[in-house]
Image (tube, coloured by chain):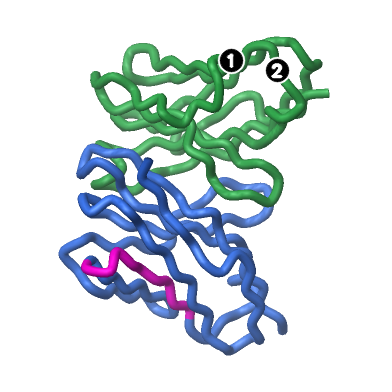
Amino acid sequence: GENVEQHPSTLSVQEGDSAVIKCTYSDSASNYFPWYKQELGKGPQLIIDIRSNVGEKKDQRIAVTLNKTAKHFSLHITETQPEDSAVYFCAASIGGSQGNLIFGKGTKLSVKP
Amino acid sequence: GAGVSQSPSNKVTEKGKDVELRCDPISGHTALYWYRQSLGQGLEFLIYFQGNSAPDKSGLPSDRFSAERTGGSVSTLTIQRTQQEDSAVYLCASSLNGGGNTEAFFGQGTRLTVV
């Protein structure tokens, strides 16, 4: 079946450094790519998303890039802060606009003060 | 309510018993998803409901797992003859009209422990 691969599984950075998480997807019909942040004991929450007609989107310290040809998208966090420490999940829509959401396996980000 | 509500928040059950997990999606959301998250692991897709379409059950791990969505709103995930490997957090999410279009909002999850 269709899947989403996410790397790395863990990432440790110093406060103030940048963090990059990468995902690839298999369904060429995927058109929506959200990123979720999950803090301990809570459900995942959307932090940014991108649609297939856009190559890059930025929201303050967070940016996402999409390469449809390579079926690859990435999350970039700049000037990391300790409160950015969490598990981050990428996802891709499967089966078009009415379709399912399939998630990557997550990246545990640790930001050291 | 304002968000996706799941109940119970915690459930401890004996091996071999059946359990039912409930999800109340955001009012008006046509799409509803169930995922399973084992300790420290990712979000494993279980089942997806979209409007009146037949549900996508391709993620259900065995025939002990089933789910229904009554009246296009509340959903119940049922696990029969529970096994210890079923222990996990079960997360429900809903979105306005499908995963390829709009944000999916997650509930807090039900932590299931099979002893």
Region in magenta: A69-77
Q: Is residue B24 above or below residue A94?
A: above
Q: Residue A100 vs residue A106: left or right?
A: left
Q: Residue A90 vs residue B113: left or right?
A: left
Residue that appears at 35% across and 68% down: A73
Q: Is mark 2 on a helix, strand or loop?
A: loop
Residue that appears at 52% across and 50% down: A44
Q: Position of residue B99 (x, y in %)?
A: 31, 43
Residue that appears at 53% across and 40% down: B44
Which badge, 2 or 1, comes first in the chain's sequence? Answer: 1
Say which colour chain A has: blue
Residue type at the position of mark 1: Arg
Q: Which chain is green?
A: B
Residue that appears at 26% across and 71% down: A67
For the residues labelled 2 and 1, the Cα–Cα distance comes to 8 Å
Question: Which of the two residues, B83 or B92, is positioned nearer the viewer here?
Answer: B83
Q: Is mark 1 on a helix, strand or loop?
A: loop
Q: Which mark is residue B64?
A: 1
Q: Where is residue A31 in the image (x, y as percent from the top left)?
A: 23, 54
Q: Is residue A71 magenta?
A: yes
On the image, numbered disc 2 is attached to which residue? Answer: B82
Q: Which mark is residue A80?
A: none
Residue type at the position of mark 2: Thr
